[in-house]
DNA sequence: CCGACTGTTGCAGTATGTGCAACAGTCATT
DNA sequence: AATGACTGTTGCACATACTGCAACAGTCGG
């Protein structure tokens, strides 16, 4: 809608791929060097890009700080955190909290496993949306039209033999997840890792977030992990209660 | 330098404080509502702001993803990570990696303590620059003029009785840190937490990053932690060697 | 010393962003 | 149900502020 800002913002994903010099930026934007220079300078002043010693530009520090602050301001995160901690203390495994936002599912909080073998994940990272247990819960609750549209435009990478292969299979699974009110990922993302997840709901019953417990096969089998389901659901319900104001902390 | 972009980017820190509606954004920018609307729309298209159900705007998901990618692209981080892991396995405590960038020091990697009592910190978060051991190392290596200018404009919050109280004291400490080639934070940020840190250097000998081991008093005393210094320095030197190409991994 | 390169500046023209004013919703009040 | 106050949205005329050019500066390599 605003050409100048549009161009400036297009620089960010471009730099996310790796450092670039003025000429490269100008070329990829399809503008004159002097124009690119002025845009980069403005981004620089705001700390969003950084000029490294070889004069090339890369993404800057303020970006982290902004993402950080944004995350801390999510009230669901604040409410949920103590519950996640408690669950982690009880079962020892990695606990995640995730939300859906415009086509992506992101982890917004995490409590690390107390076992030495840990799952790789990072707060802020978009999750593998077609296989993650939390993603299934969040997408299952979208309005029909949106869910179908999204399922169609997703890719279905075959991380493992158990990964969801295509849109129809995914939609079928989402139906089931919605009815049962919980979800799993049994080796669909990484062969040896299983997850059990439950939804956090707002006052109107809509799913606002989802939480999961994950553990590798070498620590507990899938069956053993499934025995934690009631505990996970209780935790999610407790968060829901507090979030919708029914159970003041 | 570019008014439009400047205005648009000013919206981001504003929203970092918390969600705001169109009118509030327009007021704080000092522009007409319609102008603010167009800027917000552009930011929205790029995923940097999100419009929540009550129509208010807040920071969006792409911001996390960008910050994420930016971090993954820091080659020092990639090189250092296995070393940090190894050090963590050897001593069990929390290990941090930090860099300096335009007036701020940020953690860019972290391996959590294997003890139940952990220090709070988060990757991407700016560190307490006047007291953190890693910050001392990074600032001690700045050119004189820049170091003095920075020291002057910093705040010196008294987190504890041992916090650095003012600029002269800070500069004196930085001198010492530079000469000895390592740094500590003994309860300067949180009463019960101590850190030992060592610098990572590039080919030219300049400090490009700093790493630290942190542990609370209840786990090890400050004296015990200091016995880890040689190990921390060896790790930092190993990273330096690899980073400057002397020791190909 | 020269040429090729990248980054930087000042400037004229106009595309582009601006504020206005009028409109469309939504909610609370009477 | 009708009124008013509110917030978000649209189209438009004006001129501001962004663009690309061309000329300059600095750096590297031959």
Image (cartoon, coloured by chain):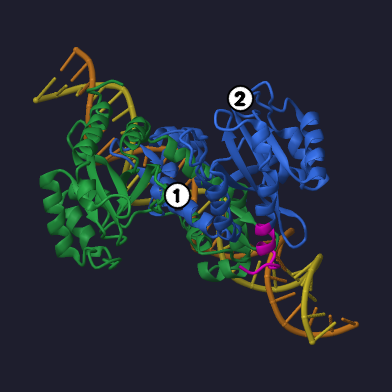
Chain colours: A green, B blue, C orange, D yellow
* Res A75 visible: yes
What residue did someone put label 2 on?
B191
Place residue A239 in its image quadrant: top left
Neighbour tally class for label 1: few under 14, some 14-19, many 20 plus, Cα within 10 Å: many
Report x, y in % for residue C11.
70, 61
**B242 within the magenta span:** yes
Q: Chain of mark 2?
A: B
**Who is closer to the viewer here, A246 or B236?**
B236
Q: Regarding mark 1 in the picture, which secondary structure is present there?
A: helix
Q: Which residue is mark 1?
A: B63
Q: Secondary structure at mark 2?
A: loop
Residue range of the region highlighted in magenta in the rendering: B238-249
Measuring from the top left, give residue B173's x and y in whole percent. Answer: 78, 35
Point out residue A179 in the picture as x, y percentages from the top left corner. 10, 46
> Is residue B145 among the parts visible in the rendering?
no
Q: Is residue B229 left or right of residue B80?
A: right
Label 2 environment density (alpha carbons within 10 Å; few <14, some 14–19, many ≥20): some
Front residue of A200/B220: it is B220
Return the mark for residue B249.
none
Tell me the residue at 28%/68% (across/down): A158
Where is the C terminus of chain A found, in terms of image quarters?
top left
- Check if residue A136 falls in the magenta segment: no
| Front disc: 2 or 1 | 2
Report whether mark 2 lies on the same chain as mark 1: yes
In three-dimensional space, the C-alpha distance between marks 2 and 1, rounded to whole angstroms, equals 34 Å
């Amino acid at each position: 809608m605003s050409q100048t800002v549009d161009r400036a913002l297009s620089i960010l994903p471009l730099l996310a791929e790796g450092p670039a010099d003025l000429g490269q930026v100008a070329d990829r934007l399809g503008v004159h060097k002097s124009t690119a220079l002025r845009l980069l300078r403005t981004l620089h002043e705001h700390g969003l890009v950084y000029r490294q010693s070889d004069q090339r530009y890369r993404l800057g520090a303020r970006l982290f700080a902004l993402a950080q602050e944004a995350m801390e301001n999510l009230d669901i995160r604040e409410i949920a955190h103590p519950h996640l901690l408690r669950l982690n203390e009880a079962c020892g495994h990695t606990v995640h909290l995730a939300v859906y936002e415009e086509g992506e599912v992101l982890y917004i909080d995490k409590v690390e496993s107390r076992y030495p073998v840990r799952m790789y994940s990072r707060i802020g990272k978009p999750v593998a949306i077609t296989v993650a247990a939390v993603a299934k819960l969040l997408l299952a609750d979208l309005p029909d039209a949106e869910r179908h549209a999204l399922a169609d435009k997703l890719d279905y990478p075959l991380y493992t033999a158990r990964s969801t292969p295509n849109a129809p299979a995914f939609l079928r699974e989402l139906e089931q997840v919605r009815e049962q009110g919980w979800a799993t990922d049994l080796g669909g993302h990484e062969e040896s890792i299983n997850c059990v997840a439950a939804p956090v709901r707002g006052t109107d019953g809509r799913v606002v977030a989802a939480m999961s417990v994950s553990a590798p096969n070498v620590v507990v089998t899938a069956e053993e992990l499934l025995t934690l389901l009631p505990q996970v659901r209780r935790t999610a319900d407790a968060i829901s209660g507090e979030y919708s104001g029914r159970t003041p902390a």
